[in-house]
């Protein structure tokens, strides 16, 4: 699926989002795409299997974190279940301070293993990492 700000594809259980821009409109568009995917996942798996997705920020750069997080809380809070989420960030500047801060906050909550940073040339590796992690959940869940 292509929109004004985002290209989205599904690869064997992993959602891949390529951002062309990171404006508030792009983030709103992202959640328009994610909303039915998240709802279907929660309906099917509740919180037994995490969600797996790639945030490809190669073209756009880092998104406005506060706005993105506020939207995430708003979107997720309407669901009974909130499955864990594994995210691979693909970004040119792997030393982006905002992204590092996010990862540090997750580490404090013992969630550091749910996020990884990849360089643009490692996009396939990012998808593969998520597929490998997903396999450990799918294989043990009835």
Image (cartoon, rainbow, N blue to C red):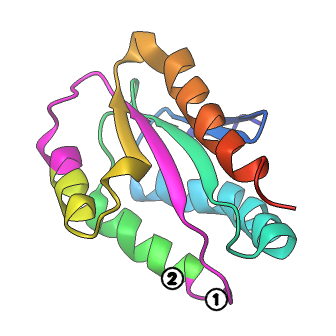
Percent across and percent down for residue 25 are 49, 56
Which residue reaches farthest front?
140
Left or right: residue 110 versus residue 14 is: left
Question: Is residue 86 within the magenta segment?
Answer: yes
Q: How many numbered discs?
A: 2
Vertical relation: 18 (above or below) 136: above
Q: CA distance from mark 2 to mark 1?
A: 7 Å
Of residue 42 and residue 37, the one placed in the foreground of this image is: 42
Q: Residue at x 34, y 19 (%)?
A: 119
Whether 89 is among the magenta residues is yes
Residue picked out by circle 2: 74
Residue tagged by mark 1? 78
For the residue carrying disc 2, how many other residues have a C-alpha within 10 Å: few (<14), some (14-19), or many (20+)? Answer: few
Report which quarter residue 95 is drawn in. Answer: top left
Q: Secondary structure at mark 2?
A: helix
Task: Tell whether label 1 touches label 2 (CB within 8 Å).
Answer: yes
Residue 28 screen position, x and y as percent = 54, 62
Residue 66's disc number: none
Report the residue at 16% width, 37% height from top: 96
Q: Residue 106, position in %: x, y?
A: 27, 62
- Of all residues shown, which one is farthest toward the top? 121
Which residue does the image show at 62% across and 33% down from the upper left? 132
Please state if 19 lies on the left or on the right of 46 as rendered. left
Task: Look at 80% across and 69% down and name the residue there.
Answer: 45
Query: Which secondary structure lies at badge 1?
Result: loop
How many C-alpha atoms fall within 10 Å of the one at disc 1: few (<14), some, or many (≥20)? few
- What is the magenta range? 77-100
Is 65 above or below relative to 61?
Answer: below
């Amino acid at each position: 699926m292509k929109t004004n700000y985002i290209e989205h594809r599904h690869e064997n259980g992993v959602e891949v989002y390529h951002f062309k821009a990171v404006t508030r409109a792009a983030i709103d568009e992202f959640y328009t795409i994610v909303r039915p995917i998240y709802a279907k996942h929660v309906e099917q798996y509740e919180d037994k299997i995490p969600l797996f997705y790639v945030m490809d920020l190669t073209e756009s750069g880092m998104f406005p974190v506060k706005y993105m997080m506020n939207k995430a809380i708003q979107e997720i809070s309407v669901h009974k279940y909130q499955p864990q989420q594994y995210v691979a960030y693909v970004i040119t500047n792997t030393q982006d301070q905002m992204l590092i801060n996010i990862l540090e906050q997750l580490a404090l909550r013992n969630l550091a293993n749910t996020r990884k940073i990849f360089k643009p040339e490692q996009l396939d590796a990012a998808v593969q990492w998520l597929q490998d992690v997903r396999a450990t959940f799918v294989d043990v869940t009835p």
